[in-house]
Image (cartoon, coloured by chain):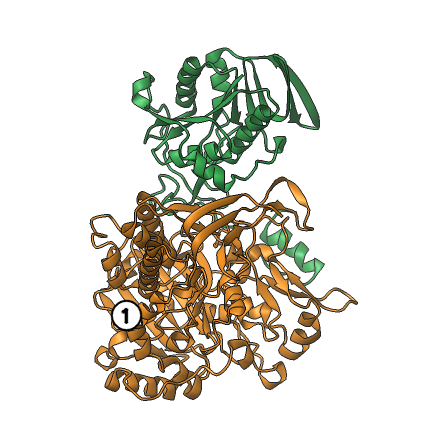
């Protein structure tokens, strides 16, 4: 079984994000960029399936600027067999991403595609679902446990107040939730070896997809700064402030 | 224990200006040699913090076409101010009065982290293997007591020492020569200094703690290329230190405050000194309508010429600030760090080319360094810092300035650094409590909101990387005798004395706050704290510090 894993290069979850001066986007200058944490989990799940003998090849794919090669190399160091970069300097929308992934899926014919449920930069949570629709494949989103028996995939997903279990036959799509697994660390010798694994670069314009965005970002604003808290000295004072200053009681 | 082994000709610990320069020089001299650099930061530059006004002399030699290659060195120093501060006033020292090393014409204001990022690209292009996120945690020796390389730390070990599901054991990196470029007070460097008695013929090292913030200021007040240094207030006459304010690109200003760690009063709090410095009437107006975007701290070497340890040992050498080449009055060290690294690289290359017994000590390196500009400039200013310790701010500066201005350091005496910094700390009952003003949350801040801006990543569930040699000493000795100064000298709030109801006080270590400045390893009066590396990739993620 061939598994395709989509990984996105995003601002590191531990970096503080700042809105740029003209409020058109997030400041990425001098900011550390890493693999989207949900995608790390997706790749880890693929690696575990391969270790169980259920997968024969893992392909990591990313869509983004030329620097996204670093993210793909990290995927290769973690254990993926080869990588594909669809190169673009544009900020693409989920539907376009899904269409591009669809093109590559038709070419590579994987039996399983695993994606993070969302990217932590725009939180869109759309690509996996749209890709399933384009391929007309079954999908199990927000997976917290995956088991595969022959062609049958069983996926547990956390829903409000309990667990839901879904099953589908391959080929299909899984998007991952945080609790699915704990990703491994890349080992030094594997980082070394990853340098010689195949990484194909495809220009995004050559795939025959209209990349034009359908949405316009009007502005991006940081949340308002919360006023400083005060220390009250008595219950009466607290009630007084809540009633006459905050006007909530 | 058997570890997986990787073999290189040269392994370098630390991807700062020294480590990267050594790697680049080695590859320039012998492109086929295998060279690798390990760095504990998650990314290159993540743990680099410096002012920085940069002198390009070493870079001009290493990469002469740095400008064409797009080095992030763009802001020329345009204005250069030296001020003495009292609590309410500021006096500018006319530049004709300043000794030559204090002049900054021809220098640049840079982010050293960004310079390192660029240097790492140059090194990668030359074929150097650079591994950020991997901490060298142990020196490896053979049975002839030669250094044969380093081991990286284990990843995925739980706080109690057990292996977590993602446990990945560290590996051994073997090399003919191992270069230590950890920067000031490197943890492996210190273990080597002890093992090979490298400080036997040198003075103790003396240090400073630099605390730095980056601000975005009102464009109307921004003067790209403006450099300002101050001495005096808020420190007293006996405490060495001062500030820098550098106007970078894009309306950013770097502001830093350095406190000499040989300070005596255990109640002194370098973090609070930095915060109250900003409230000085000559400083405060610059930060009107400004926003703080970054925070960090790092210890620096101030010992200079007298404190340079023996630089070589069987199988390797100390380069850059692992040894300590900062020029104190000049407030610059990166050029010397790079220069020392290049000379060490040349010595390594010669030794490997001769193909004699590998790992023989690289005596050619210290010999070349003694003939170089590094020793020349450090020798010239060698008495500057000790004069201050002896005579205090006023007389110390006057005498040291005189010596430098009139004689260019050509005097027959060399003053010593008599003691380690920790040994100068007074007992609490001999000192008076210092009352610092409360942070206003606009111009001055508390530790918690500051550390937040250091972008620290640190998995809490890992063994604590700050070791106490004797766990009882903190409460039995340090707390009653010195009023637990670790609460104050730590700029990140790692050390906390907790008073539980009806219980004896206890020391709580918030290891996840650590910004890797190394001050606790230096200043603990009882020499009880040992700084070791946590899991690779932990610690601050400085953007353009």
Q: Chain letter of disc 1?
A: B
B331 or A193, which is in the foreground?
Answer: A193
Residue B444 x/y as whole percent:
47, 64
Relative to B467, does residue A186 appear above or below in the rendering? above
Q: Residue furthest right?
A: B502
Residue B354 x/y as whole percent:
33, 56
Q: Could you tell me which residue is drawn at 29 percent across and 74 percent down?
A: B377
Residue A144 x/y as whole percent:
63, 28
> Which chain is assigned orange?
B
Residue where numbered disc 1 is placed: B372
Q: Could you tell me which residue is drawn at 42 percent across and 75 percent down?
A: B307
The colour with which the image depicts chain A is: green
Instruction: Decide if residue B412 is on the left or right side of residue B232.
Output: left
Q: Quadrant of residue B482 in the image?
A: bottom right
Q: Could you tell me which residue is drawn at 38 percent across and 43 percent down?
A: A28
Other-residue count near label 1 (Cα within 10 Å), few / some / many at <14 / 14–19 / ≥20 = some
Instruction: Decide if residue B293 is on the left or right side of residue A230.
Output: left
Q: Could you tell me which residue is drawn at 37 percent across and 59 percent down?
A: B18
Relative to B255, does residue B216 appear above or below in the rendering? above
Residue A227 visible, this orientation: no
The quadrant of the picture occupied by the N terminus of chain A is top right
Relative to A88, does residue B445 appear above or below in the rendering? below
Residue B343 visible, this orientation: yes
Relative to B464, does residue B167 appear above or below in the rendering? above
Instruction: Decide if residue A8 is on the left or right side of residue B501.
Output: left
């Amino acid at each position: 079984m061939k598994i395709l894993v989509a990984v996105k290069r995003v601002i590191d979850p531990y970096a503080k994000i700042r809105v740029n001066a003209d409020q058109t986007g997030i400041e990425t200058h001098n900011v550390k960029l890493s693999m989207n944490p949900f995608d790390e989990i997706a790749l880890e799940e693929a690696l575990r399936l391969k270790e169980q003998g259920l997968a024969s090849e893992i392909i990591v794919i990313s869509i983004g600027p030329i620097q996204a090669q670093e993210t793909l190399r990290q995927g290769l160091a973690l254990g993926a067999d080869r990588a594909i970069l669809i190169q673009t300097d544009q900020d693409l929308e989920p539907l376009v991403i899904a269409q591009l992934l669809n093109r590559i899926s038709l070419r590579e014919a994987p039996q399983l595609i695993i994606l993070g449920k969302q990217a932590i930069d725009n939180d869109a949570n759309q690509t996996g679902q749209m890709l399933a629709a384009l391929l007309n494949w079954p999908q199990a989103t927000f997976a917290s446990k995956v088991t595969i028996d022959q062609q049958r995939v069983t996926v547990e997903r956390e829903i409000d107040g309990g667990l839901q279990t879904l099953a589908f036959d391959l080929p299909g799509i899984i998007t991952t939730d945080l609790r699915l697994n704990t990703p491994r660390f890349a080992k030094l010798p594997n980082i070394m070896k990853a340098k010689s694994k195949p990484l194909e670069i495809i220009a995004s314009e050559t795939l025959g997809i209209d990349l034009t965005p359908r949405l316009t970002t009007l502005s991006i604003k940081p949340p308002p700064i919360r006023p400083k808290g005060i220390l009250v000295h008595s219950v009466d004072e607290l009630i007084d402030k809540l009633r006459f200053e905050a006007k909530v009681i | 224990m058997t570890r997986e082994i990787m073999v290189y000709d040269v392994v370098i610990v630390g991807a700062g200006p020294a480590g990267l320069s050594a790697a680049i020089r080695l590859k320039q001299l012998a492109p086929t040699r295998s060279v690798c650099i390990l760095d504990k930061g998650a990314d290159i530059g993540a743990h680099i913090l410096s002012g920085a006004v940069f002198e390009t002399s070493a870079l001009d030699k290493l990469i002469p076409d740095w400008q064409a290659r797009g080095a992030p060195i763009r802001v020329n120093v345009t204005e250069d101010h030296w001020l003495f501060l009292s609590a309410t006033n500021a006096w500018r020292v006319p530049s004709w009065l300043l000794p030559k090393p204090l002049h900054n014409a021809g220098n640049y204001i840079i982010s050293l982290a960004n310079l390192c990022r660029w240097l790492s690209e140059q090194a990668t292009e030359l074929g150097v293997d650079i591994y950020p996120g991997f901490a060298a945690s142990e020196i490896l020796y053979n049975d002839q007591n030669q250094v044969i390389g380093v081991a990286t730390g284990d990843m995925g070990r739980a706080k109690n020492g057990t292996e977590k599901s993602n446990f990945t054991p560290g590996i051994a990196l073997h090399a003919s020569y191992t270069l230590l470029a950890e920067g000031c007070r490197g943890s492996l460097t210190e273990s080597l200094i002890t093992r090979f008695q490298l400080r036997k013929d040198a003075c103790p090292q003396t240090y400073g703690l630099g605390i730095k913030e980056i601000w975005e200021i009102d464009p109307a007040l921004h003067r790209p290329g403006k450099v300002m240094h101050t001495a005096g207030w808020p420190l007293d006459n006996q405490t060495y230190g001062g500030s820098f304010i550098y106007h970078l690109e894009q309306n950013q200003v770097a502001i830093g405050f350095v406190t000499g760690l040989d300070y005596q009063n255990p109640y002194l709090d370098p973090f609070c000194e930095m915060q109250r410095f900003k409230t000085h009437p000559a400083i405060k107006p610059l930060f009107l309508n400004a926003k703080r975007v970054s925070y960090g701290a790092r210890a620096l070497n101030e010992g200079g010429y007298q404190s340079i340890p023996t630089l070589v040992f069987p199988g390797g050498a100390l380069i850059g600030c692992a040894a300590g080449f900062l020029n104190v009055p000049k407030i610059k060290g990166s050029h010397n760090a790079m220069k020392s690294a290049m000379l060490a690289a040349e010595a390594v290359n010669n030794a490997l080319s001769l193909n004699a017994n590998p790992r023989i000590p690289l005596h050619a390196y210290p010999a070349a360094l003694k003939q170089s500009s590094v020793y020349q400039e450090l020798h010239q200013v060698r008495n500057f810092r000790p004069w201050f310790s002896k005579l205090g701010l006023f007389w110390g500066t006057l005498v040291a300035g005189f010596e430098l201005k009139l004689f260019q350091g050509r005097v027959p005496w060399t003053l010593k650094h008599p003691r380690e910094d920790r040994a100068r700390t007074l007992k609490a009952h001999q000192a008076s409590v210092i009352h610092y003003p409360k942070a206003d949350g606009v111009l001055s801040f508390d530790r918690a909101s500051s550390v937040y801006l250091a972008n620290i990543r640190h998995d809490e569930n890992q063994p604590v990387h700050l070791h106490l040699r004797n766990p009882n000493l903190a409460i039995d000795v340090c707390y009653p005798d010195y009023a637990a100064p670790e609460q104050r000298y730590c700029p990140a709030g790692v050390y906390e004395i907790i008073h539980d109801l009806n219980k004896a006080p206890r020391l709580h270590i918030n290891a996840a706050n650590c910004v890797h400045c190394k001050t606790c390893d230096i200043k603990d009066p009882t020499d009880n704290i040992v700084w070791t590396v946590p899991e690779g990739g932990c610690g601050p993620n400085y953007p353009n510090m």
